[in-house]
Image (cartoon, grey):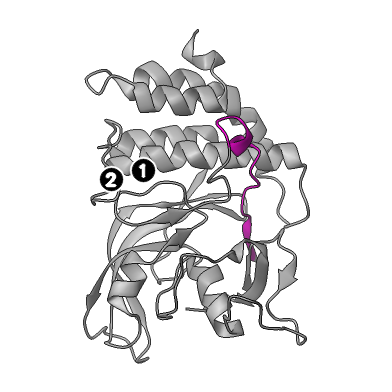
Amino acid sequence: MDASELSHVGLFRAILNFDPKADLFHELLCPWMESERGWLTAFAQQTSPEPIAIEDSWRLYALSRINQILLMAFQRGIYDSWEGPTLTLPEYLAFMTGLGFRVVDESAYSPFFHEIVDIVEAVPLRPRNDYIDIERIDWPALVLGSMMFSRAGVAVSCLAGTLNPEIATSSTLFWAHRRKFRRCEDLADGWGSNSQWRTQFRRDYVVGDKLLFNADAKFDLSDRDFAMREDGLTRSERIELLTYRCFVRCAKPDDDLAPYYDRVLLPRDFQ
């Protein structure tokens, strides 16, 4: 089959099995790019977090899985034995922007825009003691309209106590399927080879001067009637897990949690 005719799942599997000595970008990614550009360009015109068709959510999820295995080309770690695809950062950016995604360069650290890859405790040149500075960007953030699609992978520095370096870099990363450098958990885990692709994509949005995390979720963490659940997490701990997608300070066990149904709207300068 011609590369341009591959389904999302077909492309995902083709990338995993592609000869590392061959030209992934020109032989596989470029031909496939045209098949998705029109739909993604139209989707990017939606500027509000209103509900979307479930088929569109599944499609975005499949694209996110493709994106995650491509990003392994720029990661280091011991949690995944696959070395990742043979792909340069300019090729990755050409593919993703060719599909219709836009690169966002946010100089100030935000868990909305940035995924923590590494932490160096240092004294940031900022007036706030709790400020987190970006030291290195391993891959950039991508948005589709006002919706976050893929956070940037960054190394950060901060004052001792702002984050717990061991927890922030090794606790389970939720809403993620595959990383070289840490444990991941995803709603598709445990489902079959076909059913896993019927997973809903997490939608985060910039809404004016606020950030909306997990727009389609049922439980609003700003609700005054918030009640602690069986996992014993407080409201602030649930917000930490939702916004960072992992624990960064909380030392509670993270091996039996389900944060997928929480949402919250926060100020844009939230850290």
Read off the residue under disc 2: 74
Residue type at mark 1 is: Leu
- Cβ–Cβ under 8 Å for marks 1 and 2: yes
Q: What residue type is labelled 2?
A: Phe
* Residue at 47% in and 17% down: 31
- Is residue 208 visible from the viewing direction of this image? no
The span picked out in magenta is: 192-206
Which residue is under mark 1?
71
Residue 235: percent from the left, percent from the top?
A: 61, 83
Name the residue located 73 percent from the left edge and 70 percent from the top edge.
219
Q: Is residue 257 left or right of residue 136?
A: right
Which secondary structure, mark 2?
helix
Number of numbered discs present?
Answer: 2
- Which residue is depicted at the point 47% across and 62% down? 113
Instruction: Assess disc 2: are there few (<14), some (14-19) or many (≥20) residues with their C-alpha within 10 Å of its C-alpha.
Output: some
Instruction: Indicate the quadrant where residue 188 lies.
Output: top right
Q: In which quarter of the image is residue 34?
A: top right
Where residue 185 appears, as percent x and y from the top left, is 48, 54
Q: Is residue 178 placed above or below 113 in the rendered structure?
A: above
